């Protein structure tokens, strides 16, 4: 045999051996995966212990729990040693001075498409902050003076906030959506001396002047102040300036910063209030810095390369805490245009790597993905369904390394819903549903953590660790700056089996000192324990310790009620579960102690129900008479849609393993989308239960009168 035949034969043999070896290795890989999954099926992976117990157990409460990293002492500073908000930002300026800090989209007219983001560096923002702070001192403000903020998020908002931090002023947020009565209460009670706002709110501010004698100055973000505006303010004993004028004043006559101490008051943040007038929570620099330190310790993957979209209200503690955290790493923050309906465009333009939201936001993202998948050819829908199912199995087994393959084949296009670069997501404000959490965790193939906290704890209390296989239905483990115990409340007892339950009580550096000029309410909610020498904030939330040391929120102490069967109902928990229905944008669950079932007011998701109607061949004659996201009245009255929604709610309830008595017995479909402006939900989109109950009183009575016989028995 000549050489000309030996060479191709040798190559063929070598290729065959390589192919065989590859097949063997691939077979071993597949066998290993399925072998692992088989063993997992026999003995599922469990979450590691996420918190530790300290101290002795007292009657009527659980032992105190802390972060596994903080058995000996709780955090009071960040890892760099910063003890004030001013120090956090100054450290970031020193480390990242020439990096982009704040980004804004320019929009010339209402109908114009916004431009690309333009950026200001950390050094530029620092210079503007010093100028603006000096300008405030030139107006006569001194250490401890209160500066009000009455606007949606924007870069200038944060410039003014940093100025407060640098010159020991106190920032006070005024909600964009507050009625006049609450605006007067906040501005008057907190003794605001000056307000930064935008032109559209100027009339509202002027109307406060006669009831708020401390208010002297109004600062508009807009530069083109008119003589009429100056005159209107002057006639009400108010001085009107533009933001630029204050900066220019400070630049021409600068002052040295007045650095605050850790225990100095930094913010008076008013809670949105679901039942009564707002409460001004007293937040010191130490409180918020401790929270940031605890978050950084729990989420160690943040870096200066991250990009964050700021759209959650800066008037709320969640956004202030998140912004402070990302800024401490030198990350960049892009602000939305100010219109929540254009958030998709902002997200796709900015392409953030970090995304925070409340459960309703994430539920809308999940619903949007489901709708897009449903519009694809059947084969694509099948591939997507198989990929999701396989990912669920792999995630539950703690395997994530195969997910990049599924990303390339299936999920990369889905990620475009949030810009395509998301690597970490955080949900806060309320419990996030299992299905939504798991689905988005799969679609975006990134850590998706839940957090739990309140204004009174600076937004920080618990976070679900990235590494646990099963983070669902968990509010997380204590961060390093707090400790938690559960205290008996009603039927929720520390002795309950298999899991201890009770009112969530929190202590530590993150916990604030109380409410401004509300001594009785402060003493009621912030209770000093003589025995353990701690002040415990009683949250009013009902919690449950899970086997892995994480906390779950299962209801509210004041909202829990009994049915006539003696069973306890936690409606807020049920709302979190039922809101996972693709048919809904919101739901209010209601029950009475004389009844054996619960009923609900449901706000349908406009896009989903209109598509459902189209698929059913149902003509919606009044479709053009309402604006999105409202739903046409004729569709809300459609009995077939009502049956479809009740059926889907039952499916969701069964998936969450709800008890029979927790199922929705009857539902009313409300076509008007609930917004904070309508007064039925808070700025954080939480249901105002007493307000909703009063608003729908006759509807709720009719729901019980017309209860299907199968539900009322």
Image: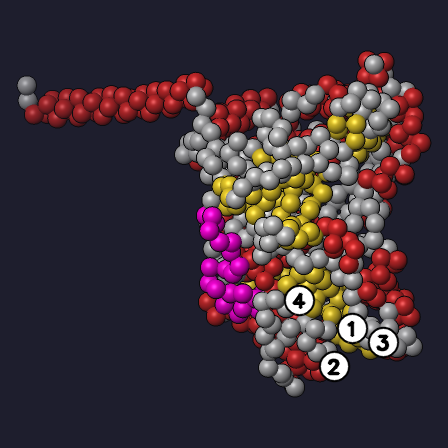
Left or right of residue 589, residue 39 in this image: left
Going 59% across and 45% down the picture, which residue do you hit? 484
Nearer to us: label 4 or label 3: 4
Name the residue carrying label 3: 238
Q: Going by the image, does 692 lie left or right of 361?
A: right
Q: Which is closer to the viewer, label 3 or label 2? A: 2
Q: Which residue is mark 2?
A: 140
Q: Which residues are magenta?
A: 69-91
User: Which residue is at a point 75% across and 23% down the rendered structure image?
Assistant: 567
* Residue that mark 1 sits on: 193
Tags 1 and 2 touching, CB below 8 Å: yes
Label 2: how many Cα within 10 Å (few below 14, some 14–19, many 20+): few
Q: Is residue 631 visible?
A: yes
The first of marks 3 and 2 along the sequence is 2
Q: Earlier in the sequence, mark 4 or mark 1?
A: 1
Vertical relation: 201 (above or below) 533:
below
- Farthest residue to the right: give it: 698
Main SS category, magenta section? loop
Residue 622 is left or right of residue 325, and the answer is: right
Spot occupied by residue 576 in the image (x, y as percentages of width and height) = 70, 34
Query: Which mark is first along the chain, 4 or 2?
Result: 2
In the image shown, does 298 or 138 lie closer to the viewer? Answer: 298
Cα separation, mark 1 vs mark 3, equals 10 Å
Front-most of residues 323 and 349: 323
Residue 559, located in which quarter of the rendered image? top right
**Does the residue at mark 4 contact the one at mark 1 (Cβ under 8 Å)?**
no
The residue at which mark 4 appears reads as 265
Position of the N terminus, as image quadrant, is: top left
Relative vertical location of residue 431 with respect to residue 643 in this rendering, above or below = below
């Amino acid at each position: 045999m000549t050489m000309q035949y030996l060479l191709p034969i040798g190559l063929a043999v070598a290729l065959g051996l390589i192919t065989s070896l590859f097949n063997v290795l691939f077979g071993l890989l597949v066998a290993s995966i399925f072998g692992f999954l088989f063993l997992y099926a026999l003995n599922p992976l469990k979450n590691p212990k996420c918190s530790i117990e300290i101290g002795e157990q007292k009657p009527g409460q659980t032992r105190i729990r802390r972060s596994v990293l903080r058995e000996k002492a709780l955090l009071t500073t960040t890892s760099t040693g910063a003890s004030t908000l001013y120090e956090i930002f100054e450290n970031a300026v020193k480390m990242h001075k020439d990096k982009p800090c704040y980004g804004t989209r320019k929009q010339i007219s209402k109908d114009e498409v916004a431009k690309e983001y333009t950026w200001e560096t950390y050094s530029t923002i620092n210079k503007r902050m010093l100028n603006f702070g000096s300008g405030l001192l030139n107006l006569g403000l001194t250490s401890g003076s209160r500066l009000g903020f009455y606007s949606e998020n924007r870069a200038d908002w944060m410039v003014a906030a940093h100025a407060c931090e640098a010159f020991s002023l106190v920032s006070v947020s005024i909600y964009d959506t507050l009625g006049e009565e609450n605006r007067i209460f906040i501005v008057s009670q907190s003794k605001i001396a000056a307000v930064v706002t935008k032109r559209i709110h100027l009339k509202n501010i002027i109307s406060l002047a006669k009831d708020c004698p401390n208010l002297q100055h109004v600062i508009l973000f807009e530069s083109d102040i008119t003589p009429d505006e100056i005159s209107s303010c002057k006639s009400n004993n108010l001085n009107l300036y533009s933001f630029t004028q204050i900066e220019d004043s400070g630049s021409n006559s600068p002052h040295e910063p007045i650095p605050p101490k850790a225990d100095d008051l930094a913010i008076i943040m008013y809670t949105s209030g679901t039942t009564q007038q707002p409460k001004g929570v007293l937040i010191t620099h130490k409180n918020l810095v401790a929270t940031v330190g605890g978050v950084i310790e729990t989420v160690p993957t943040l870096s200066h390369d991250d990009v964050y979209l700021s759209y959650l209200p800066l008037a709320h503690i969640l956004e202030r805490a998140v912004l402070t955290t990302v800024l401490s790493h030198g990350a960049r923050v892009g602000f939305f245009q100010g219109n929540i309906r254009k958030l998709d465009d902002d997200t796709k333009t900015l392409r953030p790597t970090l995304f925070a939201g409340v459960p309703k936001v994430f539920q809308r993202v999940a619903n949007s993905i489901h709708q897009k998948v449903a519009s694809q050819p059947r084969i694509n829908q099948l591939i997507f369904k198989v990929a999701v199912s396989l990912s669920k199995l792999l995630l539950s087994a703690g395997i994530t390394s195969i997910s990049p393959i599924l990303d390339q084949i299936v999920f990369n296009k889905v990620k475009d819903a949030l810009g395509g670069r998301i690597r970490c997501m955080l949900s806060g404000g309320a419990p996030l549903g299992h299905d939504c959490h798991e689905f988005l965790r799969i679609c975006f193939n990134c850590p998706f953590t839940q957090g739990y906290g309140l204004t009174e704890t600076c937004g920080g209390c618990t976070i679900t660790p990235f590494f646990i296989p099963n983070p669902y239905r968990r509010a997380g483990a204590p961060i390093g700056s707090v400790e938690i115990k559960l205290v008996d409340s009603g039927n929720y007892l520390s002795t309950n089996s298999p899991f201890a339950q009770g009112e969530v009580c929190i202590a530590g550096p993150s916990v604030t000192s109380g409410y401004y000029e509300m001594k009785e309410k402060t003493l009621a909610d912030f209770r000093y324990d003589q025995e353990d020498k701690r002040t415990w904030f009683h949250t009013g939330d009902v919690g449950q310790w899970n086997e892995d040391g994480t906390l779950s929120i299962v209801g509210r102490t004041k909202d829990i009620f009994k049915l006539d069967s003696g069973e306890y109902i936690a409606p807020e928990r049920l709302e979190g579960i039922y809101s996972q229905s693709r048919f809904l944008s919101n739901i209010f669950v209601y029950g009475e102690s004389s009844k054996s079932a619960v009923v609900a007011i449901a706000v349908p998701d406009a896009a989903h129900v209109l598509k459902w109607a189209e698929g059913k061949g149902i003509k919606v004659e009044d479709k053009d008479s309402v604006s999105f996201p409202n739903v046409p009245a004729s569709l809300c009255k459609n009995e077939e849609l009502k049956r479809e929604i009740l059926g889907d709610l039952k499916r969701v309830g069964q998936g969450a393993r709800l008890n029979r008595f927790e199922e929705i017995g009857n539902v009313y479909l409300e076509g008007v989308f609930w917004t904070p402006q309508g007064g039925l939900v808070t700025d954080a989109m939480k249901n105002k239960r007493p307000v909703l109950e009063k608003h729908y009183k006759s509807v709720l009575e009719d729901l019980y009168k017309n209860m299907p016989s199968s539900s009322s028995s």
